[in-house]
Amino acid sequence: MTLALDVQGQVGALTVTARLTAGLEPLVLVGPNGAGKTSLLLLTLGALRPTRGMVTLHGDVLCDTARGLALPIEARRIGYVPQDFALFPHLDVLGNVLFGVPRSHPDRPLRAVELLARFDLTALARRRVGTLSGGERQRVALARALAAEPRALLLDEPLASLDVEARHEVRAALGETLRSLGIPAVIVTHDAQDAAALGCALVVLEHGQVTQSGTFEALGAAPATPFVRSLVARRG
Amino acid sequence: MSLLTRLALGLAAFALVLLILAPLVGIVAGTDVASLMTALQHPLVWPALTLSLLTTATSLALILLFGTPLAWLLSQRSGPGWRALEALMHMPVVLPPAVAGLGLLLAFGRDGWLSGVLYPRGASLSLTTAAVVLAQTFVAAPFYLQAATEAFRQLDPRLTLVAQTLGASPARRFFSVVLPVSRSALVGGAALSWARALGEFGATLIFAGSLSGRTQTLALAIYAALEADVRVAQALSLVLVAVSLAVLVVVRLQPRATAGP
């Protein structure tokens, strides 16, 4: 069960190059703002076309520039939780989750209700998403992404829009949830403490390049760049 | 601010307020319910009212049907050709109505350049109800087009991207995400378009004429009524004022942005 990337992409003036593999342990992609973290997620999803390289999921090729192959986004079955969650503002909580349940599913409402219960959203089912707290919105976004039964999950700054107090709680819960899914998960963050709490595997991206990867301890033992040094120091 | 400045400012502002409200007061004042009811029974009124409702409903349907896909295309493309096309699509707003009427005549009339292309040479749309619909569509479409293009442009692209990762087809993304999220702006634009179509006068008069029951809409009936009985013209105007006011309320009540949570 792995998501493997070996891609290069051009986003404006920035060239993003990365080679990484995410297994069942959540992989944390960390780096300063503008390092190309979100772009790397978009390259994986297929929303950006790599200039060269390959993306495979559980051995299936999703994209291979050498063969001119690129599976459309909707066929990749990769769940995506964008920054600020991009919940559908015209739907309530149940509607958002239901949107993700495949139309071929034998009992769509039941599946949605199960997901609501799993993420402790049952009481909020009929609430408009605009009235939810940051933590609640994050859970809706996760439930919606999982409703489609994805084979991998990408999360972009899932903790950035939460206040400090909620963050502590949600951080631990999110890490646990992601470990329990049984699919590869990649989480983008610029925050050292989030990175430390969420995963043991870290990949540091700077100026579009992977500068170091490994556990926090390994990074701390021999920081390769000033950013990594400050990242380890900020962990506290 | 000195007293004199404040006085001058107040007077200037009041002048325009007076200019805009005075005609409305003129139409509303001096009409009582009884004379309004009598005036509305004039033979000019009913055919014009039904014709206006029929033609504006048709032109609005055409504008929504063809304008929505065009607005989507315009919002998603950014080349200079598309920019130029978008600007051209707004021409009817600034074009004098008489010029619009003449243009329609020279395109769709008996000797129009499309005669023999769209329909047999010698046939003509002018002086038919279809001509009324065409004139209304021509002058009113830009209002909806502009509102819809702008709404689609402001749509958070991540909404459709997320829908796509959830396996949604292009049609489902458009009908279940794009349209409902842009709904308020689309309703506002449609209301403005409809109001413009309802008030259409110049282009209709030149291209479709003013034949009772066939091409004589409310706006044209007011003009015709002025020669017969000014109270009938006033009653018809009152109907249009009420409708315009309702449209204004609808447009004003729509939230301005298509903001997410």
Image (spheres, coloured by chain):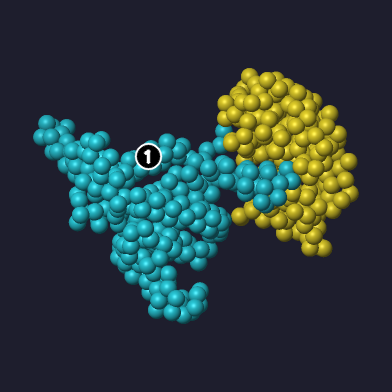
Chain colours: A yellow, B cyan
Q: Secondary structure at mark 1?
A: helix
Q: Quadrant of residue B21?
A: top left
Q: Quadrant of the C terminus of chain A?
A: top right
Q: Which residue occupies the foreground of this view, B9 or A194?
A: B9
Q: Which residue occupies the foreground of this view, A51 or A148?
A: A148
Give the amino acid at mark 1.
Ala
**Residue occupying the point 63% across, 31% down:** A92
Q: Which residue occupies the foreground of this view, A195 or B252?
A: B252
Q: Is residue B142 visible?
A: no
Residue A191 vs residue A179: left or right? left
The location of residue A31, given as percent across then percent down, is 68, 39
Q: Which residue is mark 1?
A: B246
Q: Quadrant of residue A166?
A: top right
**Residue occupying the point 44% across, 63% down:** B130
Q: Which residue occupies the foreground of this view, B37 or A150?
A: B37
The location of residue B184, given as percent across then percent down, is 49, 41
Q: Quadrant of the N terminus of chain A?
A: top right
The location of residue B81, given as percent across then percent down, is 50, 66
